Image (tube, helix red, strand yellow):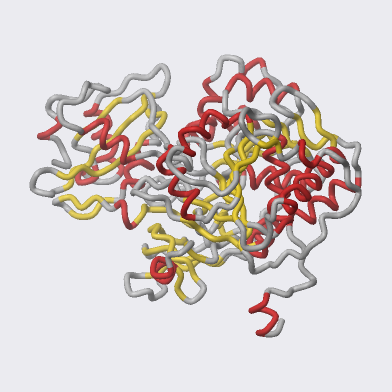
Amino acid sequence: MSQNQRKTGTDHGFTGYAEDLLQVLARHPDRPAVLTADRRPVSAGELSALVRRLTRALRSRGIGPGGTVSLLTGNTPLALAARYAVPLTGARLVYLYDVMPPKALAHIVADVDTCLLLVDASRHADLGPLLSLVDVPAVASLGPVAGCDDLVASAARPTPDAPGGHTDPHADWCIRHTSGTTGVPKALQVTHGQYKRCLNSLRVDAGDPPRFLVNTPLSHVAGLCADLALLQGGSVVLQRDFDAGATLDAVEREGVTHLWLLPPLLHQLLDHPSLPATDVSGVKRITYGGSPASAARLRRAAEVFGPVLHSWYGQSETLGLTEVRPEEHLLTGRHGQITVGRPMPEVELDIRDTHGSPLPAGRQGEIYARSPGMMRGYWKQPELTAGTMRDGWIRTGDIGYLDDNGYLFLVGRSSDLIKTLGGGIYPSEVEAVLLTHPAVAHCAVFGVADQDAAEHIHAAVVPAAGHRITPDEIRTHVTTHLTRQYAPGTIHFVPDIPRTTMGKPDKNKLREQLTRPRRAPLSHEAASARSGPGR
C-alpha cells in the first residue's frame, strides 16, 4: 500500500467484519442465528434483513464516516443488529455500560462526540437520568420505546440490496472504555482493521457449529464471542443478564456449546444446586478471564465439565494476549500462581526493566505487548497515548515474567504496588496464594495508607461454602507460601467482592466500604489484627 493510500484510507481490498458476517448469514438464511431472552428464534435471513434495514435507516439520518453512534442497549437482537449496522455506515460504535452511573455515561456521550444515541426497551429507564445531564443531537430507539422515534419502524420496508459503501480499515470501528475505577474512564480507539485481525486470530473451537450463550453484556467480551460464533456459521442464545440457574437451564435445553464467564460466575455455576442434575455434556468450551481464579475451583470445573476450560488474558488496550488450554491449567509459577498461558497467534510479548530494556526468561518486569487487536490510541489524549505506546508496543503496566517454555506468569500491576515498610508487595502475589486455600472462594488484596502515609496490606476474603477460617489461619497460609512480609495485617470476611464494569474486583469500592471511619461492620475482623504481620 502506498503512503498516499494509507493517508486517505483507500484500501479497496478490505472488507469489514460486519460485511463478512452478512456473507456468512446469506449462505444458509433459514438456519437459526439468534434465540432471544424470551426464546423467540431469529433466523440468519431475518438477522441479515434487520442489519440491512438498520444500516439504511442510519444512513438516512446522515450517519456515516466520522460520526459516533452511542448504544444504550442490553442483550437484545436489535442491539446485536445495531452492533453490525453502525460499522457498515462507517460510523464509530460506542457502548454505554449498564453499571456505570449517569454522570460517567454523560461524560462518555459528550466526550466521544455522539451524533446519535440509540436506546432499546431494556435500558429505557436509564435514558431520562442521562439526558438530564448531557445534550445529544439526536435520540432514537431500537423498537418501540415511549417518547422515542423508532428507528426500526422507520426502515420497515425490506431491501434485498447489499449495504454498499466502503469500510476504511484505518478508521475507528469502536471506542471502548476502561472501567474507570481511578476516575474518568479512558477511551480507546480500535480500527476496523485491528478488530478484524483480532477476530481472525481468536477463532475458537467450540462445536460445529458453535452455539454461544450471551449472559454478560454485549459491550464486553461476550460481544466479541458472539461475533466469533456468528462468523463461524453458529448461533447465539441471549439472556438479559447472568443467573446461574438460568444459565444451566439454557446449557441443557438450548444445546449451548460455548460459555464466556468471569471466574466468580463460574464459581456460582459450580455452587448451584441444580448442577448435578444438569446435562452439560454439550459444552465444548468454557472461556474465562478478567480476574484471578482458584486452582481448586478450576479442578472442580474440569471434573464437572471435562477438559473444556480455556483462559484468556488481555487488556482493554490490547484485547487477547495469551491463552491457557485445558491441559495447562495446573501449570503454576514460583509462588503457586496459575499461568496465564502462552501468546495467541500474532501476539508478541516482551518483559522489560524500568529502562525499557528486555529481560531474559525468569526475570520479572513490565509486560510489553503487540497484538492484532491493540488500540490505535487513546481518544483525544495524545500525551497518554505516547506514554503507553512505544515503537509499536503497548506498555501494559502489568508486572510478570516468562518461563523457559514461553508461559507468562502475572505478578501484579505496577500501579497496584503496596509500598509497605518492608518493601513493595504486588496484591496479585498474595491473592494467588490465598486462592490455593480450600476455604477461600474469592479474595481481593489492597493497600491502605495510614495517617503517616505508610501502606498496610488488607485482604477481603469470601469464605468457601461449608468452610470456616480465621484471620490467623490466613496469615499463616500466606507466610508459609511467601514470607511474613506478605501476610495481610487486616482481614475482612465479606459475602461478595464488588466488581468494576469490566468484571474485575473493585478495590476502590472495597477500600471505601471497609476502611472508612465509623463504618458499620461488614465483616468479622480480628481485634488483634493491628499488631499482626504486615503492620
Q: Residue at x 38, y 50 (%)?
A: 184
What x and y, as percent, mark residue 12? 78, 72
**Residue 423, picture quadrant:** bottom left
Above or below, 498 relative to 89: above
Q: Residue at x 16, y 52 (%)?
A: 422
Count of picture labels = 0
- Is residue 297 found left or right of 335 in the rendered image? right
Asked whether the viewer can see residue 208, the reply is no
- What is the quadrant of the C terminus in the image? top left
Residue 242 in the image: state x and y as whole percent: 57, 28
Instruction: Looking at the picture, tell me which residue is in the foreground, 58 or 17.
Output: 58
Residue sitting at x 64%, y 40%: 140
In the image: residue 123, left or right of residue 520: right
Closest to the observer: 135 or 457? 135
Give percent across and percent down for residue 112: 51, 55
Front one among 448 and 72: 72
- Can residue 388 be seen in the rendering of this structure? yes
Tell me if residue 136 comes above or below residue 390 in the rendering: above
Which residue corresponds to the image point at 79% horizontal and 62% vertical from the top-left?
165
- 228 sits to left or right of 69: right
The location of residue 324, given as percent across then percent down, is 57, 49
